[in-house]
Image: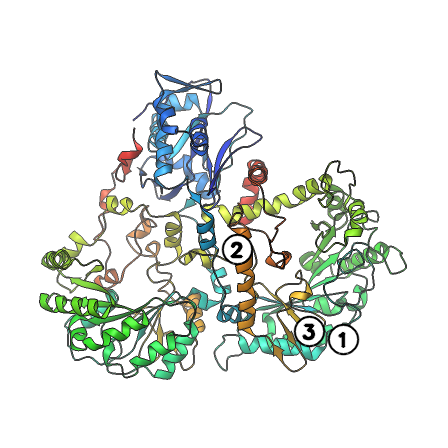
Amino acid sequence: MIKDYFLFTTTSGNRYCFHRRRGTVLWCHPLLYHAITLHRAGQSADEWFASFHGDFVHLDDKLFARSDAELAQRRFLLLRQNGFFSETSEEEAVLSLSARLSASDIETALATTPQVVFELTERCNLRCDYCYFGYHYIQSGPRSDQDLDFATAKTLLDYLVRLSPAPPGSGPSRRLAVAFFGGEPLLPFSLLQQIVGYARSVFGERARFQIVTNGLLLPERWDLLVRNDFDLLISLDGDETCDAYRRFKDGTPSYEGVIRNVRALRERHPSYFERHVSFNAILTDRGSVNSVRNFFAEEFGKSPMISTLMERNLKPGDRASWTTMVGDASADGARADAPPEAARKMLVELSMPSMARRFLSQHAPCRFGNSLDALLPQPDVRMPTGVCRPFENKVFLTARGEILPCEQIDRCHALGRVSATAVDLDFDSVAAMYNRSFDRVRATCRSCLQAFDCLQCIFNLDLKQPRIECSLAPSEEEYSGWIVEVIDYLELNGSNISEDQGI
Amino acid sequence: MSTLSVDGQKRYRVIIDSHCYLNTRGSAVLLYNSLSGRTLVSFDAPRCAELVRPWVSDKRAPILELSGQELIEDSEVRAFVEILRDELLADVVEAPPSSRAPFQFPLITGQHQISLDEAEECPPQDAVIGLSIYLTGRCGRRCGFCTTAFRQFPCCGMFDAAQDLDARHLERILKWVGGRGVSLAFFGGDVFRYPDLGVIGELLAPWPVASPTRFHAHCLNVLADIGRLEALAAWGAELAVLVPSDVPDGAVVDVREAARAARVDIRMDFILEKNEDYFRASRLEERLGLENLSFRPLYNGRNRGYFAENVFVRAEEMLANKPALRAICANAVVNRLAFGRLFISSSGDFYASPSAKPLGNIAECSLAEAASRELAGGHVWTRTRGQVEPCRDCVFQDLCPPLTGYEEVLGQNDLCHVRGAYPGKGLTIFGAPDPDSRS
């Protein structure tokens, strides 16, 4: 049995009880906290309450009025009557994680997918040291200089239109974000032009465009981007020092060329730059969170997205050089395969605002009603892991015509293929593949504390192993520690984040 | 009530419980604890309204910082805080000068504006959770309440006279919802006179996720076609049997026995127009040991008094059910009785309610499109108490059950007993005391 409620104290000394299945964060009076602590340890809180005599109660060198103790007792009983101190058996967890996908679910999700992402090319004009498609990582499929074929992209767009549930004769009524990815997607420019033109002809103003680029080819290409209001995400790691791992094939740094182009874009199209341009920076040993943030704030008045180096699929022999790039090779006593402590802290610092936002959006009582899900009766069961329903967020088409639910999933997990003339995607097979994976992973998830709040994508797990290991499954100490970190952060920043979230 | 010990030299924090809901309307403030159902309403108490205002207008964390002096000198504030504490709506602790306030989520409030934009972005068919399919207008009976009852609660009735739903349309509809767990309700007329009734089981069979399926029929129509029950049992469908007051007890007994023999699940829906109807239904419930029955109050144009006395809700009854925060929040934006439910007439027209305008016909409009049209421009799914008089100005509006079909037929909803319970001034507690939670 796993206890569903956790007690913790933040660095400020505030005490809380968190219920992992209800998502409730309950601030506790010290007397209530002590009663719940006893209860959780299998001791009798009732006996403790019954032991009070006189007008005052001593606890932790503090004196409380008897009336405070009586209120704490009533509150404890109320929580107990309402099932707050629940436990979940592994059998119950399996039942709660027993949702399955049907072919109809897959078809519906694809018919209404909000985004299609095209990998326009595998080619790139850079050879960045840390590239996920570079030499430090095990590749899950062939990768060379393949470009996407226009007919293939058109076939997928036509297919999405046919699936769309618009009434006959009225044309597609859906909105669709069309995103471009690479390699460097500005290299095959005529292909980009063709796809943009076709998507515009089919979806009209309901098509929105997005692109991720290293910025080296911007001056020759930006007219198309500006004319179509592209959301432009430029990969740049900060100033010249921070950006040192982003290099041409001959080892020359790319910084000078990129920064010149970005400045020119801002000068030429200031309004577009303000509204549509953002940056993604990879944090390495060459910079710090603050130095990267300061650079973008001073140079462009913008706040970048900051990511860390990918650890998945790292070649075992390349860990030392990867660790150097991450920033700290001196993790004394750490497991050989664990990220160094400095990297872990950096990750926490970086991810805390988004983790806190996520925590708020998942657990704030007023999240109800912010989405359709909240208005509908809640299903009793959910899918294991944090995997998305395929295509509910996007569909990704590789340059080789493979269909994937997301660009972050390895190519070996392709769900179907698109050719110049047809889409080969069998909804029954996709549903069956997911359901088989769910059946395999449930045994791991059933004993996980984070089973109902999972961040793990099922495609990141090695499902071929007899016993599936999940690197994100926390121990009780880690889980409580994570909650403490989030609530600590929210005690200081909660009201600002709530406003950002519209909560 | 326990007295709050206060030191005039210290500062205090009043921390509202995470399970609370807050609403303000005019000078009235309501705080409700969803665990206990206990509810504090302050009416015409300006200091209380002033204290809670930032929790609503600025979505501030529901924590009050008060000086001991304030608590001693301001009797209104002190009374407010003592009731909050005593009713487990809040806790009070000392707040040393350097201490950090705890983190508290903003409360759900009656002013929480929920956007349905995201719902419109979702696959619209995901919004459909129930589908009522009117198979045929054929019926040998001529019940006086037929049309009006159908507008008030789910039962057989007159919706689309004498026309049968095209079997191809039925097939199309069931393919749309197949495997999605959408609950299905089949109506007539007399559903047993639908010529393609046998097709339904075949169409439902292939789907991996069984749709909860129910057929609605008049008790005497069931009795006249009792051989159909075995088919319903084979499909795993439930039968809702409409029992008006003129149906003899013997017919109810016979249907019950036949259903038991055929192993079909039944629910007896007793129509109540007066107190005697309720007494009779209760007698039958006891005599037959009915496990599944429901009472359907019917407004017949002459029984307004019966409704006022027996049907409209009282604050204590409502709070005894301890409405959940999720339901309260949903009540603010949608009608939970209607949301996600579509009707299809036998001529193939989609409706969000039998009283509303059609959303389109199945010949030119998909289920998703019908749902999308209701989400975008319809008024049935989103008809809330916040839109109608006199609920609009009532602090209980999101706690009350959603607007019902009989209120619409009655043409008024001011028969309620909740607003009548308001005090003219001061602080009042609603909700039954929870005996086990008091030592």
Sequence-earlier tag: 3 or 1: 1
Disc 2: host chain: A
Labels 3 and 2: the sequence-earlier one: 3
Question: Where B146 falls versus B100 (above or below)?
Answer: below
Q: Is residue B66 visible?
A: no
Q: Is residue B437 left or right of residue A140?
A: left
- Alpha-carbon neighbours of circle 3 within 10 Å: few (<14), some, or many (≥20)? many
- Using the rendered image, report if marks 3 and 2 lie on a common chain: yes
Q: Amino acid at mark 2?
A: Arg
Task: Name the residue: 27% across, 75% down.
Answer: B231
Q: Is residue B139 above or below residue A238?
A: below
Give the residue pinned by disc 1.
A190
Q: Residue furthest top?
A: A54
What count of labels does the image hold? Answer: 3
- In this view of the protein, which residue sits in the foreground, B82 or A164? A164
Numbered tag placed on residue A442 in the rendering: 2
> Helix, strand or loop at disc 1?
helix
Q: Amino acid at mark 3?
A: Gly
Whether labels 3 and 1 belong to a single chain: the reply is yes
Residue B253: quarter of image: bottom left
> Disc 1 residue type?
Ser
Residue B82 rendering spot, x and y as whole percentages = 35, 28
Q: Secondary structure at mark 3?
A: loop
Pointer 3 with pointer 1, Cβ within 8 A: no
Q: Nearer the viewer, mark 3 or mark 1?
A: 3
Q: Where does residue A494 sit, x and y in percent of width and height?
A: 55, 40
- The quadrant holding residue B185 is bottom left
Instruction: Describe residue B215's horizontal placement relative to residue B105 as left or right.
Output: left
Distance of label 1 from label 2 (alpha carbons): 47 Å
Q: Which residue is mark 3?
A: A401
List x then y, in percent, for residue A6.
49, 37
User: Which chain is disc 3 placed on?
Assistant: A
